[in-house]
């Protein structure tokens, strides 16, 4: 593997936008009851259109009531393109509800499947055919392999927003320090560590839906992690166990964590009156 590219191949899918807002409760309470009802009704209609493209379509936007001081509402948008993602952002901004929202944070990324295992096989297959790395023939071989993989993995690359009660989102990096630099570790060693790391997540597969999105070149961190579950305590158990894994213990850097409770769009009016 020493002569092969050090970069693992990846497959990309849905464009993701996380929006975190504070709600202006003081201004909201100063509005007349009739105005609050009109704003709520308009918001529910707009968000229903954002949530699904049709009554039987999968969820592509979800709303969460945020816990803690970092904000009040979390909007999560999954779209097939960045243009569609930006349109969702603009559609939300056209509602009168938006006048009561103050952005607290946001995150832009794209669903990513890392291919450490298959990267090695793909590189070796291309080399076995006599193709030099990064030659036209090599690139065509890699592109063909990725195309086949993308078709097979399409449900994972373009998922619906999982129908779970709780969301945990956090960004993360791989360490690039003086004594521990993930990007200086040989490919085969990174492959081994990522395999062991992934096995922990698989053990929680029946309790947590995990969606990893890449954000290198798109936002401040390298990856975004979304965890969806019906029991928030499982977030603690999963992440705590992963802390003991070599990838996280030596090379993991983590940003702020955000936790929210799923807020069905039709219940937004009740939330605006202080009822979950």
Image: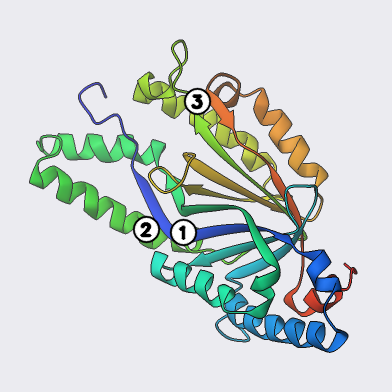
Marks 3 and 2 in Cβ contact (< 8 Å): no
Q: Is residue 214 above or below residue 35?
A: above
The answer to the question of whether label 1 and label 2 lie on touching residues, with beta carbons closer than 8 A, is: yes
Total tally of numbered discs in the picture: 3
Element carrying mark 2: helix
Q: Is residue 153 visible?
A: no
Sequence-wise, the earlier of marks 3 and 2 is 2
Question: Residue at coordinates 52% horizontally, 69% vertically from top-left?
Answer: 89
Q: Quadrant of residue 57?
A: bottom right
State the residue position of label 3: 193
Of residues 148 and 212, which is closer to you in this image? 212
Quadrant for the N terminus, please.
Answer: top left
Q: For residue 157, which numbered disc appears in the image?
A: 1
Q: Quadrant of residue 26?
A: bottom right
Residue visible at 23% across and 54% down in the picture: 144
Residue 78 image offset from top left, x and y in percent: 53, 65
> Alpha-carbon distance for marks 3 and 1?
23 Å
What residue lies at 82% left-to-right and 43% top-to-bottom?
233
Give the number of the disc on residue 150. 2
Label located before the other in sequence (1 or 2): 2
Q: Crowding at label 3, few (<14), some or many (≥20) Cα neighbours within 10 Å?
A: some
The local secondary structure at tag 1 comes to helix
Q: Count neighbours of disc 2 (C-alpha within 10 A) and say few if under 14, some if 14 to 19, many if 20 or more.
A: some
Give 151 or 247, whichever is nearer the viewer: 247
- Kindly report the distance in space between the C-alpha atoms of the residues bearing marks 1 and 2: 8 Å
Label 3 vs 1, first from the N-terminus: 1
Residue 10 rendering spot, x and y as whole percentages: 37, 46
Q: Is residue 28 visible?
A: yes
User: Picture coordinates of residue 39 (x, y %)?
Assistant: 73, 83
Query: Is 139 on the left or on the right of 155, as rendered?
Result: left
Is the Cβ of the residue at disc 3 closer than 8 Å to that at disc 1? no
For the C terminus, the image quarter is bottom right
């Amino acid at each position: 593997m020493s002569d092969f590219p050090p970069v693992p191949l990846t497959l990309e899918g849905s464009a993701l936008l996380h929006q975190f807002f504070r709600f202006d409760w003081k201004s909201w309470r100063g509005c007349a009851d009739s105005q609050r009802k009109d704003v709520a009704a308009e918001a529910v209609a707009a968000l229903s259109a954002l949530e699904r493209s049709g009554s039987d379509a999968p969820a592509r936007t979800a709303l969460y009531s945020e816990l803690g001081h970092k904000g009040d509402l979390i909007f999560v948008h999954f779209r097939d393109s960045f243009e569609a993602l930006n349109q969702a952002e603009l559609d939300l901004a056209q509602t009168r509800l938006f006048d009561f929202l103050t952005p607290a944070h946001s995150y832009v990324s794209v669903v990513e499947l890392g291919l450490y295992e298959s990267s090695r096989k793909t590189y070796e297959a291309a080399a076995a055919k006599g193709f030099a790395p990064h030659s036209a023939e090599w690139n065509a071989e890699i592109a063909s392999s990725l195309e086949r993989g993308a078709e097979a993995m399409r449900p994972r690359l373009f998922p619906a927003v999982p129908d779970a009660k709780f969301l945990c989102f956090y960004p993360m990096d791989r360490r690039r320090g003086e004594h521990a630099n993930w990007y200086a570790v040989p490919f085969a060693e990174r492959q081994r560590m990522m395999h062991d790391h992934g096995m922990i997540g698989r053990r929680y597969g029946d309790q947590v839906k995990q969606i990893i999105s890449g954000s290198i070149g798109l936002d401040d961190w390298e990856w975004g992690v979304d965890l969806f579950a019906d029991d928030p305590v499982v977030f603690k158990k999963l992440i705590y166990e992963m802390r003991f894994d070599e990838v996280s213990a030596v090379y993991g850097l983590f940003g702020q964590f955000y936790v929210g409770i799923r807020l069905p769009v039709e219940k937004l009016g009740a939330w605006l009156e202080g009822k979950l």
